Image (cartoon, grey):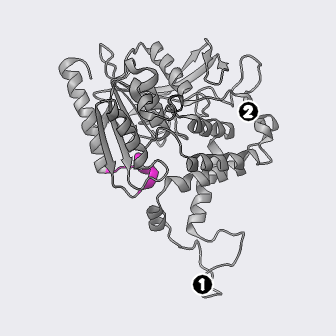
Amino acid sequence: MLIAESQSMLFEAPLPLQSGASIRGYSLSYETYGTLNADKSNAVLVCHALNASHHVAGVYADQPKNLGWWDNMIGPGKSLDTDQFYVIGVNNLGSCFGSTGPMHVNPDTGRVYGADFPVVTVEDWVNAQARLLDALGIEQLAAVMGGSLGGMQALSWTLQYPERVKHAVVVASAPNLNAENIAFNEVARRAIVTDPDFHDGHFYAQGVVPKRGLRIARMIGHITYLSDDVMNEKFGRELREAVTNNATGYKYSTQEVEFQIESYLRYQGDKFSEYFDANTYLLITRALDYFDPARAFGGDLSQALARASCKFLLVSFSTDWRFSPARSREMVKALLDNRRDVSYAEIDAPHGHDAFLLDDARYMNVVRSYFANMAKSLNEGGTA
């Protein structure tokens, strides 16, 4: 088993943000796996999705059950082989898993940021990641990779720093959110900010946590991550516990948990509310909403992606209705319009959006083959 070690790096210089604000004295938590080769050409940056972190693979020596969120993908002999590549996972600014976020102290005021933490965007995260790579002495990435929101970051890397990326692996992602996705994010945010324990985002000072809002936000999100087929297969209309005094088995209550799917969603919501920060949830979902590289080009994605110069692998999943295959095909078309080198795989998988985290053999083999070819090029010619 790969043993991971969390690291942290402090950046004193201000980081200008897209909003016009800036942040200084911030730390980024990160982990690395594998060995950086002599010419530093085998580095792969892995960008995380909404509720993940820099703990991408392996376990901690003192926490053998704390498995990295993409451990099935990354490690020795796996699809992204750490015997061949030097993999870097970075926790984004504003997160609640180590990097500076709303729970930390603002060095300019001496008080916890809370709701005063500046709004951050995908582009801001990429700029922060670039600073970390600078500090590690890595001028160019063999690849940048991510799923969902992480895929947006990977795409943004190819536009913000085209000369620093050789390959981009964009999984179950989109070039922007459609109206339905923005709507889901807004409902989840309203659940949080209307929780009486939210206190305008300064709940830390009150010694409380808006757990009710976080529970609902997670329940909404979790529904969108699963396909209808998976929900029906796992839960159907099964009841949590039968009632013997009537033929239907229903309790005929508007308050009690009766169906298995209700019980499952409440369990997921309860678990999420114990470890995730409410202000972080607001920040990250807003970053999702704002991402739209084509906006500066009148909505023309082909023009927006003209800046990209690397090779691409895009992967989508047939039952993913949150980031549907049609959204990946938009990116494929825009890249082909610019005569870029693009590989595309559309996997017929039943798992919905969560498929990008699961062990589908076809999906894993597509990624394995792509990185194997990259490693072969590195070993033969020194470049990916």
Which labelled disc corresponds to residue 248?
1
Residue 306 within the segment the image draws in magenta:
no
User: Between 194 and 233, which is closer to the camera in this rendering?
Assistant: 194
- Give the vertical position of 350 relative to 61 (above or below): below
- Given the image, on which type of amino acid does mark 1 rest? Thr
The x, y position of residue 221, in whole percent, is 57, 51
CA distance separating discs 1 and 2: 48 Å
- Residue 136 visible in the displayed image: yes
> Mark 2 sits on what residue?
115
Answer above or below: position of 77 versus 195: above
Left or right: 96, with 362 as reference point: right
Q: Quadrant of the C terminus?
A: top left
Indicate the amino acid at tag 2.
Ala
Q: Which residue lies at the image location 45% right of the left edge and 50% below the top edge?
A: 354
Specify start and end residues of the magenta stretch as a single range. Answer: 351-360
Magenta-colored segment: predominant secondary structure: helix
Q: Residues within 10 Å of mark 1 (few under 14, many from 20)?
A: few
Left or right of 190: which side holds 310?
left
Viewport quadrant of the N terminus: top left
Q: Position of residue 14 (x, y in %)?
A: 62, 14
Where is residue 148 drawn, in percent x and y? 47, 41
Identify the element where label 2 is drawn.
Answer: helix
Q: Position of residue 78 (x, y in %)?
A: 30, 38
Q: Nearer the viewer, residue 328 or 46?
A: 328
The earlier-in-sequence mark between 1 and 2 is 2
Taking the image as shown, residue 173 lies to the left or right of residue 253, namely: left
Label 1: state its secondary structure. loop
